[in-house]
Image (spheres, grey):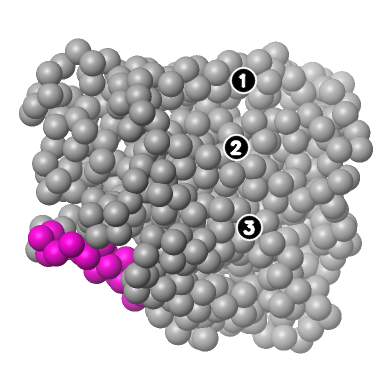
Amino acid sequence: MATRSTTAGGADTTGRPASGGRALPPLTPGPYSRRLGFVAVVATFGGLLFGYDTGVVNGALDSLTTDLGLTPTTEGLVTSAILVGAALGAFTTGRISDHNGRRPTIRTLAVVFFVAALACVLSPTWEVLVAARFVLGIAVGGASVTVPVFLAELSPTEKRGGLVTRNELMIVTGQLAAFAINAVIGSIWGSHTDVWRYMLAVALIPAVALFIGMLRVPESPRWLLGKGREDDALAVLRTIRSDERAVAEMAELHDLAAEEAEARSGRIRDLFREPWLRRLVYIGGGLGIAQQVTGINSIMYYGTQVLQESGFSQQGALIANVGSGVIAVLAVVIGLRFINRLGRRTFLISGFAGTTLFHLLIGLASVVLPQGTLRAVVVLVFIICFVGIMQGTIGPLVWLMLSEVFPLRLRGAGMGLTALVLWLANFGVSLTFPIAVAAFGISTTFFVFAVLNAAALVFVLTVVPETRGRSLEQLEADFATGAISIHGSTNDVTNARYQQDGGPSRP
């Protein structure tokens, strides 16, 4: 799962300014660089909590089932309740942070993380646990939209992409930490029927760290300026930039003020007023659903159960599941290095082709190979390959494209709506996965995933255009005029536009 977002002023998270802007003094090393690094570490604890709280249930379900008497249906409810809360949190928290500020909003989310995690640990019944995980999901969804915006608004343009994508890395790191901690706790206290409480309790630690850390970080200078607190905004910039750079950035923020106001004026209903805007909603919503029907969160939430069905022991599945977490982290790191070098469609097409193939292979291995060590190892290898392909291509690409396609004045509304669709699709897949496995078995369930991924591949091939190589302003103009389509390369479009201006063809 990825969590990229656009900045409040319309700048995307790759570091391009929302407007042409002015030349800024170069960044120079100094104590303000270390200060900015500290802020980034503190804020991304929100991403770490996001990853841990969504991934910890993977490994805790066996103990939960025994202790609370879960059925496949209630197992799905316990797992997916957090996602309904996340959809609500992602949809509403943006406006709350616009009104109250990024810093107090993240502090409040830290409190919600702590209280909800504690309620999960102390839950006497599965009904209470479902309610607690729903509240925990509100914090997860809120962090998914607030932390990237906070980082983007504090980051210098040259480092914005790298700093904001640290949050994506922290999310998968949080999931890896959940898998590893579950394996350790399960190995030591696995005989305790309530070992799941120990696993969930670990989330209390980063929640406390996030709250304490946010007491020592500044507010977003862009938010302060939007509230008319110009002196406070400049004072914050001077703590994380050289003095010359801080003054120059303040001037640039003034230039962006009109665009900031325009970006905040957009409403969801405006997305349906023109055919080209409805097309963007169709593309964005379709990409959000396509990302979730890959089934990635079935592995991230139910991986140990899948491995046990394939032949691993309970403890062996806990340990083997760590491999998926390691590969997820490595794949995101590698994917982020190449994400701006290859075409978006190339990444997506390759990703969905790969996920379709490995779903088929997982299903076939479950049918053809007899239950035992060989089948368990083969399925594990295919799962790791699937996770690597998905997290290195589709995962980050979908969020990047969602941040690119919507016009500035509707970017917040468009991202909010498509994020809601994505989270609800995540809920649907996560709720039905254990029910489908219980009713049809592992092999049939993964064959269904293969069909869904093939359908997603067709959607990308026939609907999703290439967006790489165009500025955000060019994308808005090309969508509005119909100049952008799934046919032809980005360079073909760029060359045509450049030659109309009298320039030679670009390579």
Image height check: is 485 above or below 171? above
Q: Nearer the viewer, mark 2 or mark 3?
A: 3
Determine which residue is flagged by label 2. Answer: 288
Along the line of sight, the residue nearer the viewer: 165 or 449: 449
The residue shown at (75%, 36%) is: 281
Q: Does 437 sit above or below residue 11?
A: above
Indicate yes or no whether the magenta region holds residue 257.
no
Q: Nearer the viewer, residue 113 or 432?
A: 432
For residue 228, say whether it is visible. Answer: yes
The residues colored magenta run 189-207
- Residue 197 magenta-drawn? yes
Amino acid type, residue under disc 1 in the picture: Phe
Res 501 quadrant in image = top right
**Rendering coords of residue 117 (x, y %):** 41, 71
How crowded is the residue under tag 1: few (<14 C-alpha within 10 Å), some, or many (20+)? some
Label 2 sits on a secondary structure element that is: helix
How far apart marks 2 and 3 lie (CA) works out to: 16 Å
Q: Is residue 15 visible?
A: no
Which label's residue is closer to the chain start, 2 or 1?
2
Residue found 12% across the figure and 24% down from its top: 371
Snapshot quadrant of residue 210: bottom left
> Which of the labelled discs sits on residue 305, or is there none?
none
Q: Position of residue 188 (x, y in %)?
A: 9, 63
Residue in view at x 30 percent, y 27 percent: 442
**Is the residue marked by circle 3 packed among few (<14), some (14-19), or many (20+) residues within 10 Å?**
many
Q: Amino acid at mark 2?
A: Gly
Q: Which mark is residue 88?
A: 3
Pick the quarter of the image with the C terminus. top right
* Residue linked to disc 1: 459
